[in-house]
Image: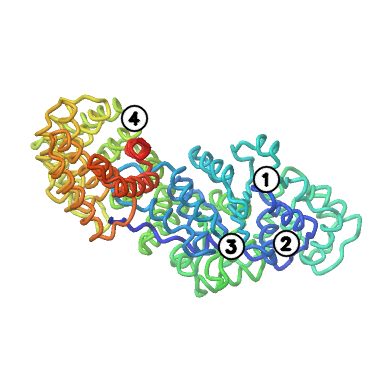
Amino acid sequence: MTTTPADPPLATKLHVPQPPLQLVRRPHLVERLQQAVERPLTLIAAPAGFGKTTLLSTWLEHAPVSAAWISLERGDDDLTRFWSYVFTALERVHPGSGTSSLALLEVSDLRPLPPIETVLTVWINELALLPHEVVLVLDDYHLITTPSIHRSVTYLVDHLPSHLHLVLATRADPPLPLARLRARGYLTEIRAADLRFNAQETAAFLARALGRELSGEDIAVLEARTEGWIAGLQLAALSMRGREDIPDFLKAFTGSHRYIIDYLVEEVLARQPEPVQAFLLQTAILERLQGSLCEAIIGEHGGEASGQAMLEQVEQANLFLVPLDDERRWYRYHQLFAEALCHRLQRKHPTLVPELHQRASAWYEQQGLTHDAIHHALAAADFEQAACLIEHTAEPMAQRGEIATLRAWLEALPDALVRSRVELCLWQGWLLALSGQYDAAERLLQDLERRLRPSPIRPLLTAMSRAVQPPQLDEPRSLIEYAGRVAATRAYIAFRRGDTPRTIELALQALEQLQEDQTARGLVAWYLGIAYLWSDDLAAGAAALTEAKAISQATGNSYVACMATFELAQTQVRQGHLHQADQNYQQALEWAAARGDSFAATGPVYVGRGQLQREWNDLDQASRSLQEGIAQCQQTGNVAILLLGTLRSHG
């Protein structure tokens, strides 16, 4: 089975952040975390700046458990991407623990991914064999908003092995069944009230941060004004450095958190050298910072100091820079600090912001990190560049199952731009059809069909081919091929609606127009074969399925190749050609074995062959074939074949 390479996983997101140098030990909270391992889920929920990440990293520094850590980002709000990172994180801690699950998410066939519960079941069964306690930490879980991710996390919590413990650090309560988990005793909660610094902790923190003792009265005022809010204390300490008028400063230290941040960032930035101020403001748009990336962002305004040297200078000044790896190559700003910097940047240099995002997009594109490149292109409102990048990566993303992200990107583009680019229109139509919005997809495709007529569309395609595009993009495809893709999507719509005549008509049109080496041809031929079977034309159905099998094997689409083999052999059985059907099954298994396709795709083939073996009274071999087929169909979520195999195995 062929796979499509995804963006390389960012190792820095999988590192446990290092505790800060000016650390106040909090043994009572560390002890609570250690005791919480006895329950499936720990929830650390508090507003930004309450020390959630610091507490966890402090605990894990000496905890007697293995820890897998993921620092979540906005781009991880995609079901496939989210679980890919989770499986990778556990794989780093316990090699081999996520191999099968990752493989299920990385299949390249043009088909829906298996239900995530099926993938998680495979993963949980692997984790059950681990030899000791494991903690999985999902930091910044509030960035996750996709309902299917929350449902899958709930499924994981409900079925956790006894020695796997999940920790969620978040600014807001996640939409999980917390009440039920509390009632069952499955949940440990640490809230803002638990995380606030008390008077003793405030005094210890300020003494370390300032290098001197404050009066008890000043500490009490600061504690009361911040309500133990750790980020506020840290900002206050930075502003108080070198001051002698501490009481006067504290009198002015009032208002809501937002006003405190605005006031203190002004004070902090005003005390920094001009090059440092410029560096902080211009790199604030980045979620992660690295030397060469910062140099690309700063450009000619960066002066003589390199990006890495500036990062080290900012870290030494304790300006809310958090190292993300042991080599101190990657960093991030404290989120509140970054937000305040971005606010100031927008206020002082609004026209510079899009340019900075464009530079970041270009750097990420050069590094092959397309997700980040598109994120910054969209943030820059550079929709043409974003559109080019999306066109380049749409097909591999769809093959990997990252449908939610692809849909979000297209929705972020102006509708007029999407409609002006044939490639994006085709993807938009396919996504609408895939989500069941058949009427909307039909309207879009009908409009596109009108524009694909040979004479009026040629000038449009010529203009599009001259648009600014990354040099690695292919030339615009032919009109006939575009028309074939339209017909293929409309054939899918007709197929899902159960419109047999329309499915046959459109599938035949698509097969005539699509290129010989296109993966979609196999899918269309498969729909066509089933539609013929629906109309009781067994001969035409068998011919179409034979073609679907041949095309899919030639293009490496293992799933469609095996499903077409199953449907073809079932048709041959109905025609009384049992040995011919068995030969098809054997050939498919040999083909898959030669390709190294050792799981999942061949499940239907094993189930079908097991049926034949039962028919021939070879019960032992039939049992082995059916069990193998059932196991593989469980991995792919192929419910129809799974049900058939289960019934036959017990029949």
The label on residue 436 is 4
Q: How has the structure been colored for display? A: rainbow
The residue to which callout 1 is attached is 45
Q: How far apart are marks 1 and 2 (CA)?
A: 26 Å
Q: Distance between the residues labelled 3 and 2?
A: 46 Å
Q: Which of marks 3 and 2 is in front?
A: 3
Q: Distance between the residues labelled 3 and 4?
A: 45 Å
Q: Do the residues labelled 3 and 4 touch (CB within 8 Å)?
A: no
The residue to which callout 2 is attached is 238
Instruction: Specify whether 4 is left or right of 481.
Output: right
Mark 4 lies on a secondary structure that is: loop
Q: How crowded is mark 3: few (under 14 residues within 10 Å), some or many (20 or more)?
A: few
Instruction: Specify whether 508 is left or right of 275.
Output: left
The label on residue 118 is none
Q: Which of marks 3 and 2 is nearer the N terminus?
A: 3
Q: Earlier in the sequence, mark 1 or mark 3?
A: 1
Quarter of the image for residue 373 reads bottom left
